[in-house]
Amino acid sequence: MKLSRQKRREALQQKLAEDPFLTDHQLAEALGVSVATVRLDRMALAIPELRVRAKTIAASTYSRMKALTGEEIVGDLVELNLGQNGTSVLEVDEQMVFARTGTLRGHFFFAQGNSLALAVVNSEYASTKSSDISFFREVRPGDRVVAKAQVISVENGNYRISVEGRVQDEIVFQGKYFVMAVDDRGGIGRG
Amino acid sequence: MKLSRQKRREALQQKLAEDPFLTDHQLAEALGVSVATVRLDRMALAIPELRVRAKTIAASTYSRMKALTGEEIVGDLVELNLGQNGTSVLEVDEQMVFARTGTLRGHFFFAQGNSLALAVVNSEYASTKSSDISFFREVRPGDRVVAKAQVISVENGNYRISVEGRVQDEIVFQGKYFVMAVDDRGGIGRG
DNA sequence: TTAGTATTAAGACCAGGTTACAAACTGCTT
DNA sequence: AAGCAGTTTGTAACCTGGTCTTAATACTAA
């Protein structure tokens, strides 16, 4: 069960890809090699120690989870004029794109636009009634998508909001959101 | 700046809710109290040490992030007839809803519909060109959203797909997705 | 055989804890 | 003022999962 150094390192990377929470000790056992060798291999492959890995994963996924599910805004809100307009920026990273095409998954565009539209309204219980979005250009990890929202019209609590997302002045998506501002909790159409 | 023990412990929990990656030392400084006290408080509140917190967060969010971003489908695909129709089920949990209203965030609807639409097309590089969605009813944690997609028309690689999401026969969202099947990598309009 | 590389082992050190215990400071009663 | 309880703080020893350095051993090709 002796692997060449090359093979062993590939196996090590594979193991860690499957489960990044393995200690050097566990890795050593799995690969049938000493802990010292595992450390050397990690060094050579520039793989940080378990704690750093855990913390990095935690910190990155945590904030992203928060952004995606726990918080009200997807993307960083950089400007906001309630009832008028707003701007948010979304940094695209590897986690957000399709494995196959390497391009941003549509729902991040939708989510960025959606949450920006809701932020602009900022009623106690604003909610999206409907939306209409088009995607123009592919986006890749490293791109910064700047979304600008503009309120087009307001009619007793019903906002029409236009959102445009650009990467360096090139438009990547364009959408209209119809948002309903509900101030009591009895309304319908929460999104 | 002296807090009662009660208040201090609340403050500690608050701090950790905001940023779970604070060391005892940082907490001690923030609360104006010794490290030993922080440890006692953590003990009393059954809050594990930093490393355990990091690892736990990492382990739990890691799998969820993979489910949310790393895979091609949001929701569980339960039926699929390529080029024709498909069904997916999304279990709504607390992480997916707005804190304030307790209702599902629009982008999960969008994402469920979007990924289902793409799955139905299943070209090598299918991508959403545009969409048009309406949200009808609020959805709460525990609900199972069953989405059914139906291909309406196909014209040289351009699919019109209608998706309906229901919770127990009650319609919660309805959307049309325009998906482009791109078999080479040169096309535009990836979503 | 021997040089050079790969592997292992052994020792000291570190961060961020743990446990156990002692000391000090508080508020309050007697 | 003395005594006591509860709270807070400090100290020392130990643990894990590493670090870094040095040294010894094993393997392999010339």
Image (spheres, coloured by chain):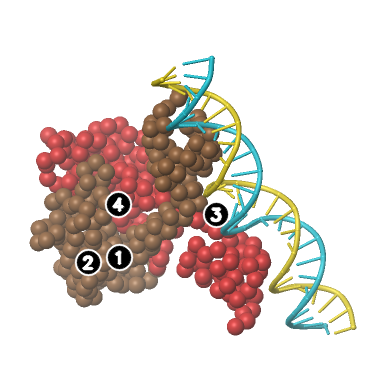
Chain colours: A red, B brown, C yellow, D cyan
Q: Nearer the viewer, residue B156 or B72?
A: B72
Q: Secondary structure at mark 3?
A: helix
The amino acid sitting under disc 2 is Ser
Q: Are marks 2 and 3 on the same chain?
A: no
x, y (%) of residue B121? Answer: 26, 70
Q: Earlier in the sequence, mark 1 or mark 4?
A: 1
The picture places residue D7, in percent across and down from the top left corner, at 45, 32
Measuring from the top left, give residue B100's x and y in whole percent: 24, 41
Residue at the spot x=45%, y=42% of the render?
Answer: B42
> Residue beneath label 4, please?
B95
What's the residue at 36%, 47% (across, down)?
A67
Query: Cβ–Cβ below 8 Å for labels 2 and 1?
Result: yes
Q: Which residue is mark 3?
A: A52
Q: Alpha carbon of mark 1 to alpha carbon of mark 3: how far?
A: 30 Å
Work out how far the residue at label 2 is from the one at label 4, CA to CA, in angstroms.
19 Å
Q: Secondary structure at mark 1?
A: loop
Label 4: which secondary element: helix
Q: CA distance from mark 4 to mark 3?
A: 26 Å
Q: Residue at x 60, y 76 (%)?
A: A32
Per the image, label 2 sits on a secondary structure element best described as: strand
